[in-house]
Image: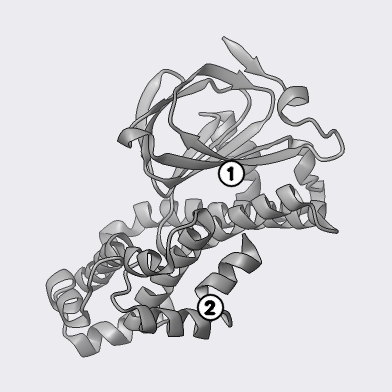
Amino acid sequence: MKTLLAKDWIKDRKLPFRITKNRISTGYETHKHEFFELFYVSEGKFQHNLNGVDRVVTKGDIVLMNPSNKHSFLPADNGNAETVQLYFMPSFLDVSAKLLKKNRGFVELVYMEPFYGEGFKYFHVSGMNEMKIRSLLFEMLYEFEKKPNGFELAVKTKLMDMLITLVRVYEAGKEKSSSVARLSKKAQAISDSLSYIDAHYKEPLKLEDISLNKAGLTKEYYCTVFKKITGRTFTEYVTHLRLEEAKRLLLAGNLLVTDICYDSGFNDLSHFTRTFKSETGVSPLEYRKKNK
């Protein structure tokens, strides 16, 4: 079995970190590595074998592994899956003992809980958490590839931010599993409706249908609770999801703006252009030129 060496995969000794974006169109044989690996499924799905156990990973899944694990990839979904992969040495985080003591959750995630037992952790992120993590990953990718002034500190800061976000997802998952029995029927209904919106935001969505058919609540009550949970109105929340997808599509290739408009869930080009410019301050084409 092949062992991926840090000197081959993380070549800069002064910066023990690497980030790449990859298309899973072919398989990769079973291997292990000398460094931590984190990968995020940004598109599609593929088969991931971790320590002999097969699992299909899909968009929004994140896998964090320590060096002791062995894994392999097999393409699925016609080879259309895409990942953003991080490789880093523990020294890159350079977390002081004092900071570790203060941030027990961070220690458990990165250094202790997954790694003393399983040595890995699967996450699934959606909605605002996925948008934040996706944004941080693509910002790190830009910093690492373009190397503007201060990129090393920028990459480290963004990595820490992402790991802390995963700690919170992990902790929230533990809290949810212990308190799920206490969830009221209404709270669970709203939670389920949010999951539906996160999965179907590219489709036509009507507030009346979601509140009544997905949550079983009156529109007025649903809107009140929705705003408290998300900090946004229903329309603002759906629009934000669609704009983030449009930004991703603008930077992912050379699709026409018209295609991106409809692929991200908007059904009117002029409305899409106005909304995009209102949000970002630039037109879609200017955004692509400025950020690609």
* Residue 20 horizontal/vertical position (percent): 62, 40
Compared to residue 277, the image places residue 173 above or below, namely above
Q: Amino acid at mark 1?
A: Leu
Q: Which residue is mark 1?
A: 109
Q: Which residue lies under the disc numbered 2?
A: 283
The N terminus: image quadrant = top right
Q: Residue furthest top?
A: 1
Give the residue type that dot 2 points to: Ser
Q: Kindly indicate the quadrant of the structure image that contains residue 94.
A: top right
Does 153 sit left or right of 208 as displayed? right
**Residue at horizontal 56%, vertical 52%?**
167
Which residue appears at 37% of the width and 69% of the height? 258
Q: Nearer the viewer, mark 2 or mark 1?
A: 2
Residue 236 visible within the image: no
Q: What residue is at 49 percent from the left and 51 percent from the top?
A: 170
Which residue is drawn at the image coordinates 15% and 77% (left, top)? 209
